[in-house]
Amino acid sequence: MLSFFKAYKSFAIVFAIISLIIIAIIYNILDVQKPLPIYQPAQVAQDLVDSSLIDVKKYHKIAHFSLINQNGKTITENDYKNKIYVADFFFTTCQTICPIMTDHMVQIQKEIRNDNEVMLLSHTVTPEIDTVAQLKRYAIQKGVDDTKWNLVTGNKKDIYDLARKSYLAVKTTGNGDEYDMIHTENFMLIDKKRQIRGFYDGTDPKAIQQLLDDIKILKQEYKK
């Protein structure tokens, strides 16, 4: 009788170990990271979307652009080809949310400094004030790494069109004249196909951490 129970005990231990291994394998198979959504204008709050795009349900991408960075260099979408990037809209004289947003961009820059896949792009919404020289002073003050992060200026209407029609980032249309200004706390995560993969409150530390986590998820997409 004792030998029977000893044999049964051994069998039970082996069975339990095998069961645990099988459970672990199944868990790993099922625990596949879900891809980030691809945001289309029809999925975003209508007050953030230009009226011409409200019904667009697929194929939305960041439009072609040509702007000037803090070093006087022309920056286009080609400078972000095959890159993941974080975009925002700011102005250097802002005393409210911009300093917080910029500090969070600096934090992101630290995290991606050695990552060749990821870059940053900040658009001024007051180009008449934020000249190349002003952007350069601001970049030096904030510790901007020119190889990772472009602060760009240019035609105000073009910038406002990008904010409203490409990045789906602002609630007002903005006519681009000298008395008009749009602003947003949104950070947008853009993939290598110029598609929007996430929106984040640039003033919220928790949202910034989520953004950093989502960058890792997005990078995994390109390893498959």
Image (cartoon, rainbow, N blue to C red):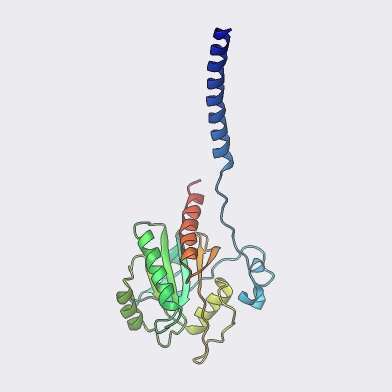
Residue 79, visible in the rendered structure: no
Task: Tell me: residue 206, above or below residue 49.
Answer: above
**Which quadrant does the N terminus fall into?**
top right
**How many circles with numbers are drawn on the protein?**
0
Residue 186, above or below 17 = below
Above or below residue 36? Residue 170 is: below
Q: Residue at (57%, 12%) from the top-left corner?
A: 5
Front residue (pair 73, 56): 56
Q: Position of residue 222 (x, y in %)?
A: 49, 50
| Residue 7 picture quarter | top right
Compared across the picture, whether 84 is left or right of 69 comes to right
Can you give x and y, in whole percent of width and height, for residue 67 in the image? 43, 76
Q: Does residue 64 appear to the left or right of 109 in the view shown?
A: right
Q: Quadrant of residue 143?
A: bottom left
Residue with the most extreme right position: 55
Taking the view exactly as shown, the residue that stands out farthest to the front is 2
Does residue 23 appear in the picture of this structure? yes
Q: Residue at x 42, y 74 (%)?
A: 100
Q: Position of residue 59 (x, y in %)?
A: 62, 63
